[in-house]
Image (tube, rainbow, N blue to C red):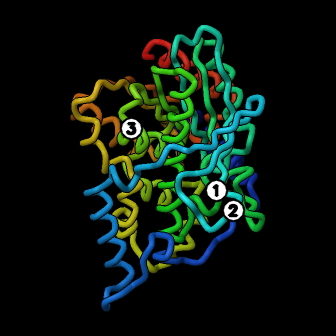
Amino acid sequence: MLSFYSRYIDKWERRLASRDTNRVVRPFEWGLEWLGFQTSNGHSSATELRRLARQSLLNSGEFFAHERPRDFKLNGDLLTFTSPLHSPHAENNTVYGRFFPARNARGRAVVVLPQWNADAEGHIGLCKLLNRFGLSALRISMAYHDRRMPPELERADYHVSSNIGRTIHASRQSVMDARACLDFLEEQGYTKLAILGTSLGSCIAFITMAHDRRISVGVFNHVSMYFSDVVWTGLSTQHVRRGFGEEITQDDLRDYWSVISPASYFDRLRGRTLRSLLIWAGFDTTFLPLYSRQVLSEFSARGLDHSVVKLPCAHYTTGRFPFNWMDGLAMCRFLRRSL
């Protein structure tokens, strides 16, 4: 039986979730063209996607490898550069970041990845708070977000959608863009580098940390082992789930999207000196607690150095007072201690 408090949080959460009235149920697509091949030799699209996932996991270092951009431009606090991974949408191929250098940072800087559908001001307050803790921050707009959004969109639908291949491509692009931000910070003289991600940004941040040894500290704000489980079961992605219809199952999607799931890359953390903060919400209906606990268990079973914060709220309510302050202060304090 639900307590009064849990019912209160759930009602508040659903009210916040219902404010977005521009969610679009898009048709299911395999999206093979986004991954550089078409169905051939009699193989089905499902077979091709599973084969791609296996190959990419075996060679994930190459799959997420990037070329250092040569066109970093900093105008005031606005950083721009060309994404290392091309997409068919010109707007999406320029990466935008907001750079907040701190006084006396002593070589410490954090790449900040906001949540799915964050606007251009998302996490700016967090970056300024990081400054007050003596940490420089570089906030990045992920693929198809705010200025990177093609004109036909109102939301960042092309980053997470029922087009399987396009979602893989967008996540791969965001990982490469995050790694390019580390290049920029290195050029500015920063030597102690961390990454912080929220929700979708948490997934991208984990994969980035797993593939870039320059990162020594990771903060993952809302956690799940599999990208697909959140999309399939989460309150905020039910319109995406409806787009798949009866074409595939949750297990199928877990296979196809294994290449963009944190669960696939824990082995890459072995033998590294890393510190991680795992944050989850006890009443979350987007990142279900079941899936968050799996991440906590995996970190513990592998003996990985980590701390845990459990928030007494849900997903959308994390951004509301007092939970936003609990969350932000926990992240900033951990980063100041760990970097």
State the CA–CA distance, disc 1 to disc 2.
5 Å
Tell me the residue at 69%/34% (across/down). 98
Instruction: Look at 62% across and 50% down and name the residue there.
Output: 82
Residue 56, given in percent of the width and then of the height, sits at 32, 60
**Element at label 3:** loop
> Which kind of residue does numbered mark 1 sit on?
Asn
- Tag 1 or tag 3, which sits nearer the N-term? 1
Residue 43 drawn at (x, y percent): 31, 86
Q: Are marks 3 and 2 in contact (CB under 8 Å)?
A: no
Question: Which residue corresponds to the image point at 62% horizontal and 40% vertical from the top-left?
Answer: 140
Picture layout, residue 233 above or below residue 299 = below
Q: Residue at x 31, y 91 (%)?
A: 42
- On the image, numbered disc 2 is attached to which residue? 90
Instruction: Find residue 150 and name its label.
Output: none
Looking at the image, residue 202 sits to the left or right of residue 72; the answer is left
Q: Mark 2: which secondary structure?
A: helix
Secondary element at tag 1: helix
Badge 2 amino acid: Ala
Dot 1 and dot 2 residues touching (CB under 8 Å): yes
Q: Nearer the viewer, residue 308 or 89?
A: 89
Under mark 3, the amino acid is: Asp
* Furthest-front residue in this view: 70
